[in-house]
Amino acid sequence: MVDLIYQLFPYAIAFTIPLLITSLGGLFSERSGVINIGLEGLMLMGMFVGAFTITRIEMTNPATAVWIGLLAAVFFGALFALLHAFACVTLNANQVISGIAINMIASAVTVYLARLITGSGNVQIIRGMSRVTIPILSEIPVLGRLLFTQTYATTWLVLFILAFATFLLYKTRFGLRLRACGEHPHAADSAGVNVYLMRYMAVMISGACAGLGGATFIVTLSGEFNGTAAGLGFLALAALIFGQWKPWGILGATFFFGFASTIANVSQVIPVLSQIPGIYLKTFPYVITLIALVLSSKSSQAPKAVGEPYDKGKR
Amino acid sequence: MNHIVEMVDIRKEFPGVVACDDITFKVKKGEIHALLGENGAGKSTLMNILFGLYQQDSGSIYLRGDKVSITNPNIANDLGIGMVHQHFKLVHNFTVTENIILGLEPTKAFMINTRSAFARISDLSKQYGLNVDPDALISDISVGMQQRVEILKMLYRDAEILIFDEPTAVLTPQEVQEMMKIMRGLIDEGKTIILITHKLREIMAIADRCTVIRWGKVVGTVNTEDTSEEKLAEMMVGRKVLFELNKKEAHPRKEILSIEELSVSGSAGRKGLKNFTLGVRCGEIVGLAGIDGNGQKELVEAIIGLRKADSGRIMLGDEDISTLSIRERIETGLAHIPEDRHKHGLVLDYTVQENMILKTYYREPYSSKGLLDWSFIYEHAENVIRDFDIRAGEGADSLARSLSGGNQQKAIVGREIDSNPDLLIAVQPTRGLDVGAIEYIHQRLLEQRDQGKAVFMISLELDEILDLSDRIAVIYNGELVDIVDADKTDENEIGLMMAGGKRGVAT
Ligand SMILES: Nc1ncnc2c1ncn2[C@@H]1O[C@H](COP(=O)(O)OP(=O)(O)OP(=O)(O)O)[C@@H](O)[C@H]1O
Ligand SMILES: [Mg+2]
């Protein structure tokens, strides 16, 4: 049993990380007052751009290809999110509909380009990110084996971003203003905060994060772009709600999803679990989410003004 | 001239209305200048222009003699103009400090320097006697304290010209006294105040001058020394206002509302209601007096069904309504003018006609066979608009949000009285209304009574309670202190009872 946990842990973490960073992106967007249903599409964009970039350069720069791929995914994620920001902030469009449009555009464009490039529609990278065991720290009993063996550098990067985001949101001027825009944009505006600018920045951050999430998924878990994000973006969105729009809440929620999904994925090879029909294990995280959402809906911490286009003239 | 603010020939039109019709308005440095006018006269609009929230269509603004163009609130801030809005602009889950520093955060090594902000706010709070806890969350503090946070926000920005849009409408009488003291303190420190209020007594008590506007036009500016409440009212409404009510003798009949041993628990930090017993008869107005936060809110919410009672019964006529749904209670003959017009009164993004049928849309004649009858609904809304003099640019098609605060209130009062309920629960029915409108609403409430209907009025305004009620119940600490006939008591006695003293014991 203990061995099993030791074995599963690296997979669970690897699965958690793309979700976590994407969800964190959603947090920025929603805390500024813009719903981001488009996380799925933004992730998909990250997956495609990441995979594509890496296939182009991995022959010539095998050492840095993965990192350049991640960087490209971040950039294009942010750029693609600009579309969502433009629709929601400048055009005052319905944010849910704009998000759905983002998802549809993303899957159409990426699949089209992938077919054009490879013919099959799949973009496969040769070498993903390699796992490293951190010296010294991995010697710590229990924790060392759980957390510091066989880890990906992206895991540490994302955790660093999580810590930094928390700092940014709660300790800096930028964070205070961002949160004010999501709670009471009129208050922010009359205090001299540029609500439009803050929301643009927040939505672009969410695109960058989701792009990173998608590319991370490619380089650590799947190794190929195959035209779908398989609902990961929506899972990240659920984690955002489950985590009550708080960075550490999101960490808990995504880890829960990551662990539960990993168990479901490997259940067939584990004797204890193979008795349970796979469908129960697969639906388990979602059922728990539904229950948790129902229970927490009374005291929802959702930003007050999320979903409302900001209209200056409104009083 | 030593005018600090000069607004010259300001014009602002909205669809269907001229909110400001070439208004010229001048304020001297160091004075308290009151701005008086009927609901929808254009006061808030004029001040929003000065604060940069709206742009004037034409006209110019001079500040300390220089022509300025105030295109957004930032510029107003930089020019030393601050404003406390009719509806506060505070982030509910931020602390007092965070709300105040928002937009002007002091930083140290990229972090917000809470320590220095805290110190500055404490100092300001002490200097002006504002008594605000910088660490409290906005959602945990009283309305009065929230208002002082708004004042601190202006002071933190070094504003010299302070605009108050109906600051006292949401305050208890005690808080009003305190507010006036604070304003005097501000003037002593060299600030200039523009004060919008409907309360003539406050203008006479604290303002130096008063500008009256009607239908977007200036009627005149007077020194308060040379005028009286009556004269101001006449200037504003354009006719004589009767401060005396035409009140006939009441002929109460059988009891319609019987509250029996009702206990309700209060929300966090409030006291709730304990074994409360009270009856209201047909053909009378019962007023409930009490200091805010002594269980009034819990009582009202329990009667209309927004809150569950712990024990006791509420009878409406012969029916126990305490377990009925809100709609069933309404159908039994209950109507309610809520305390918070935005939260429980109106859907701000619906039109006036849609708001008029919020409680009745599913019923004949507003709908038949599941379809809404829009021509009837429109007709109905237009009637209420006419009867209650609701001023809305586009009539029944105006969005509730576009109405001025007082007209929003009139829309709610109109809807509830128009439904001709057996029992009307009226919480602060005239909050934010001008004297003319108050007079009219009071008449209508008396009319309800004379037709044999019952009115249960909850108000923080002692005057309103004394003038209108036939009997006065006093609540303290969630318990009924006593119930007395209105013509056998006076302000002093009620005041003592509001502090918990039993009749005859304290006097
Ligand atoms: N954003 C807006 N859109 C449309 N009409 C508006 C808007 N703002 C104000 N108005 C209209 O302009 C007129 C003046 O409104 P304003 O709020 O200035 O009145 P007010 O004098 O402050 O009244 P009150 O005492 O009731 O607060 C009203 O008829 C109102 O309906
Ligand atoms: Mg107003």
Image (cartoon, rainbow, N blue to C red):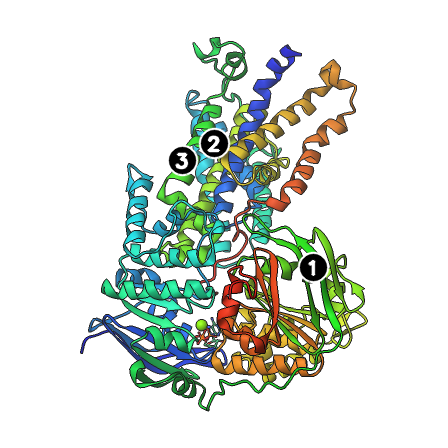
Q: Are marks 1 and 3 in contact (CB under 8 Å)?
A: no
Which residue is tagged 2? Answer: A53
Element type at marker 1? Answer: loop
Element type at marker 2? Answer: helix
Amino acid type at image mark 3: Phe
Q: CA distance from mark 1 to mark 2?
A: 62 Å
**Which chain does the residue under circle 3 lie in?**
A
Residue B215 x/y as whole percent? 44, 84
Amino acid type at image mark 2: Thr
Residue A195 x/y as whole percent? 42, 54
User: For this view, does A71 lie left or right of residue B504?
Assistant: left
Question: Which residue occupies 61% across, 36% down?
Answer: A235
Earlier-in-chain disc, 2 versus 3 = 2
Which residue is tagged 1? Answer: B305
User: For this view, does A108 lie left or right of residue B124?
Assistant: right
Q: Is the CB of the residue bearing disc 1 within 8 angstroms of ligand 1?
A: no
The answer to whether one can see residue B405 in this image is: no
Q: Is residue B291 above or below residue B26?
A: above
**Which chain does the residue under circle 2 lie in?**
A
